[in-house]
Image: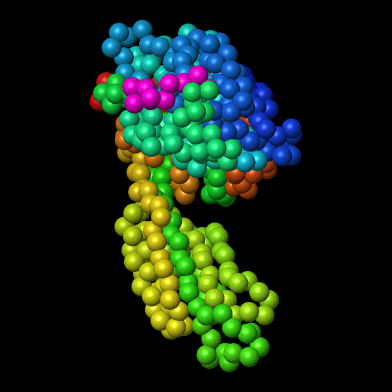
Amino acid sequence: MTGLKESASLTWEWLEEIARCSQTADPDREGVTRLCASDEHRQANDKLRQWMLAAGMQVRMDNAANLIGRYPSAAPDAKTLIFGSHQDTVPNGGKYDGILGVIAPLALVHYFNQNQIAFPYHIDVIAFSDEEGTRFQSTLLGSKAISGTFEPAMLDAADAQGTTMRQALEQFGCRPELISHDAYQPEEVLGFVELHIEQGPQLEQADLPVGVVSAITGIERHTLSIKGKAGHAGTVPMNMRQDALVGAAQVIHYFDQLCKGQDDLVGVVGKIENFPNGVNVIPQQTDITIELRSPNDASRLAARSTLLAKIAQIMADYDLGYEHQLIYQQAAVTCSESLSSMLAQATSAAGIEPMQLFSGAGHDGLAVTHLTDIAMLFMRCKNGVSHHPDEAITQVDLLSALDVLQQFCLLLKGDSTRS
């Protein structure tokens, strides 16, 4: 694995270099802020283009600002294996979330090119333009574009300065009216594989560098507005109060217990607003958000039904009114059994015990599954920390991940006739 060790070092070097394409002055302390169609995005694409060309790849940018490098096959009618992840970040995010899944496959292709290793299929590495949705609050722009599920209404979304996505993409050199023309055709694609930091502690607890993802979680979000009656906190008897915040507290406690009672459920009440929010005033209205996630849609939907019934009961018990709204839902995505099995075989071939786990976070694969089979490989990150400057990985784990991806490519090379 001498050559792969050099590739791991190169991956590390490139990750450090591209982290400086950031609005922040010190990525180690302040994290990385890199938004879609920004100056920092342009700087990152310039570096990626340079590295792709050095790896023997053909390079293009599509009209959704995805940068795509192709390591071409000599076979005339070759299909395409896609590696990729997003280059954009959350504000003050870490150096590895997303971009690891671009840089590591790129370094692997560099290794293939240096060693003249050819494949009966093309290898495309895609740096997706916008997965996080930080700038326009509209996620999965890049992966929807290549998958043929891009919705033109997304172009009307505006950032905090009033610049629309359409305007930003045009300023970036794209023709957003042609995004629909940039989709891959399903019959041309072998599959999609994304390497990503785990964003959780399971691999670290298992003392394993990588794990194979079984599914990407389904997500739903709700708003709940609880209506009570304001009053003087010193004069209204306790048994006569309609305290909206007390009702919210009961819902929050119940929801926490509901999620803790089932292994495939996680949830959070992430926002809370209280009115009139006075130190000596009984709360009249409390608004909360509820987010529920599960890789099993049946579990998520059953939990939703149970929660809504309990909310109705709590509101009746406390003589409160309420308004509920489901504001977002995304079904879970199951990773391809065949590609995941091949990733597990590749993990074993790299001398690593295969471990299966599900993703509690969303990824570009949520969109790409509409195009082709998907698989994901998680890599261990220190303390499971992500979306934070403290994100940390090791070069040793990088080497393991590269070895697994190499073994996967070789296995697929032996089974490249799959449809």
Image position of 406 with respect to 257: above or below? above
Q: Residue 176, percent across and down?
A: 42, 25
Q: Residue at x 45, y 44 (%)?
A: 362
Q: Residue 398, percent across and down?
A: 58, 30
Q: Main secondary structure of the magenta part?
A: helix
Which quarter of the rendering shows the N terminus? top right
User: On the picture, is 20 further left or further right than 139?
Assistant: right
Give the camera-side residue of 369 and 63.
63
User: On the picture, is 206 further left or further right than 336?
Assistant: right
Image position of 307 with respect to 147: above or below? below
Q: Residue at x 43, y 72 (%)?
A: 322
Q: Residue 351 in magenta?
A: no
Q: Is residue 138 visible?
A: yes
How are the residues colored?
Answer: rainbow
Report the label total: 0
The magenta segment is 172-181
